[in-house]
């Protein structure tokens, strides 16, 4: 039995992997064997006959940002003529369209705006919740939250408590990239570093909140730094138990200052996701990233450790600005799950199944929209 076999057998049996073992897996490039082990772990953790997906909309309320991220094609400086802030009526229209298509949440994120005070964000949240109380607001990644504390000169806990009271339902794991300060300093300026990113999540979890964790890889990080990222996420999950899911994707280089690095292929994505499934033994869900990988690789990810097909993504802007635009209908997402032998089920951000009648409403609403000319499922 080889060292790789022993490591995989250890993980499949439920034992925790060490960082050095995860690194050996990434270095081995044994894609099919590691993927098969990740699939076995995913089936052990999720023996149910279904696999899930979500319907939401990524609403970017502003693209104005004081941080400079070499990997980002979306942001605009505060002095740019291309900067915008969505008016409230436009934001509410986007939420209304999401609800009409069976969506149960919005992903609300923006740049690090230099002027807005906390009451501006509180008013935005409370206005949305007053109009759409049934919609979960999955909003404000750790870099935004940390930025709020600096602009308002308020303690982190106070900021999070006020946002929660105003209607914030859960935190997305955006802005993590690689949670290693060497990497963060190399590709960003003016953005939160590792310990503070993690502490935003820690305090949110202490307040009873739930969140997702992410990793954007395939740029300047080493394989060892990918493992370090996974280790920091796993340590915090041991401490708080507040992460519902992990999502990873490859760096999308087009139109960014790091375009010369090129794009990592599907094998790199599948290998990294599979190792993440083996390593993150305390995070229940792994989400496929079809938005960056496309339908076929997104589907293949479901047998490389993922148990969730991700979101329909009625709207997505950040990845699209980097030149990656994959469009899927709800029927395509459901069919991709069915082709793997599972029952497709809609869920919410907390991974609770949506009632069958609401799920059927969403299926029919999306089919009607797809049959109407000029109304794309994903509007960019």
Image: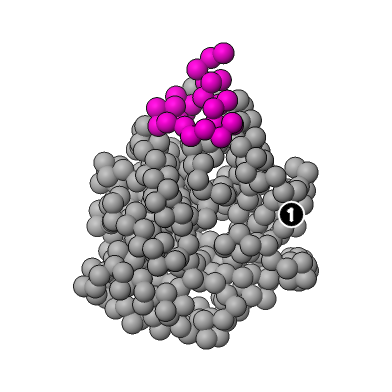
Horizontal side, residue 5 vs residue 374: left or right = left
Residue placed most toward the observer, 14 or 113: 14
Q: Quadrant of residue 370?
A: bottom right
Residue at position x 70%, y 53% in the image: 333
**Would you say residue 259 is visible in this rendering?**
no
In x, y percent, where is residue 277?
54, 40
Main SS, magenta residues: helix
Residue 378: % across, % down: 61, 63
Q: Mark 1: which secondary structure?
A: strand
Closest to the observer: 170 or 128?
Answer: 170
Measured along the vertical axis of the image, is residue 267 above or below residue 119? Answer: above
Q: Counting other residues with Cα less than 10 Å from the Cα at mark 1, is it few (<14), some (14-19), or many (20 or more)? A: many
- The answer to whether residue 289 is magenta is no
Above or below — where is 179 with respect to 130?
Answer: above
Colour setup of the view: one colour
Residue numbers of the magenta segment: 1-26
Which residue position holds label 1?
A: 344
* Numbered-mark total: 1
- Is residue 2 part of the magenta span, yes or no? yes
Identified at 51% across, 48% down, the residue is 283
Give x and y (percent) for residue 11.
54, 31
Residue 218, placed above or below residue 141: above
In the rendered image, the quadrant that contains the N terminus is top right
Give 344 or 270, whichever is nearer the viewer.
344
Seen at 64% across and 30% down, the residue is 36
Outermost residue on the left side: it is 153
Assign the C terminus to one quadrant of the image: bottom right
Give the image location of residue 260, x and y in percent. Answer: 37, 38
Residue occupying the point 28% across, 56% down: 196
**Is 295 placed above or below 92 here?**
above
């Amino acid at each position: 039995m080889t060292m790789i076999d022993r490591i995989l057998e250890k993980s499949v049996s439920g034992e925790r992997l060490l960082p050095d073992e995860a690194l050996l897996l990434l270095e081995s490039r044994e894609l099919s064997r590691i993927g098969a082990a990740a699939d076995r772990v995913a089936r052990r953790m999720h023996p149910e006959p279904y696999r899930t997906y979500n319907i939401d909309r990524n609403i970017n309320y502003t693209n104005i940002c004081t941080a400079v991220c070499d990997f980002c094609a979306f942001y605009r400086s505060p002095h740019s003529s291309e900067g915008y802030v969505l008016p409230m009526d436009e934001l509410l229209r986007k939420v209304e369209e999401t609800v009409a298509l069976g969506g149960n949440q919005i992903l609300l994120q923006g740049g690090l705006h230099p002027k807005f005070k906390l009451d501006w964000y509180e008013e935005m949240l409370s206005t949305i919740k007053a109009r759409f109380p049934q919609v979960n607001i999955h909003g404000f990644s750790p870099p935004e939250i940390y930025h709020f504390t600096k602009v308002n000169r308020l303690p982190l806990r106070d900021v999070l408590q006020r946002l929660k009271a105003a209607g914030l339902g859960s935190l997305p794991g955006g802005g993590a990239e690689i949670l290693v300060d060497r990497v963060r300093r190399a590709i960003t300026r003016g953005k939160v570093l590792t310990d503070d990113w993690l502490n935003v999540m820690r305090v949110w979890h202490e307040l009873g909140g739930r969140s997702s964790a992410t990793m954007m890889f395939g740029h300047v990080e080493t394989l060892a730094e990918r493992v370090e990222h996974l280790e920091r996420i796993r340590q915090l999950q041991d401490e708080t138990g507040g992460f519902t899911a992990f999502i990873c994707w490859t760096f999308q280089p087009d139109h960014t200052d790091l375009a010369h690095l090129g794009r990592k292929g599907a094998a790199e994505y599948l290998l990294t996701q599979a190792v993440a499934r083996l390593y993150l033994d305390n995070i229940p869900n792994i989400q496929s990233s079809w938005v960056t990988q496309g339908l076929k690789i997104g589907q293949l990810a479901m047998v490389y450790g993922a148990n969730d097909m991700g979101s329909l993504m009625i709207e997505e802007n950040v990845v699209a600005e980097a030149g990656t635009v994959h469009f899927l209908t709800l029927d395509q997402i459901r069919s991709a799950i069915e082709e793997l032998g599972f029952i497709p089920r809609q869920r919410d951000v907390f991974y609770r199944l949506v009632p069958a009648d609401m799920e059927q409403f969403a299926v029919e609403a999306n089919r009607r929209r797809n049959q109407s000319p000029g109304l794309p499922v994903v509007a960019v």
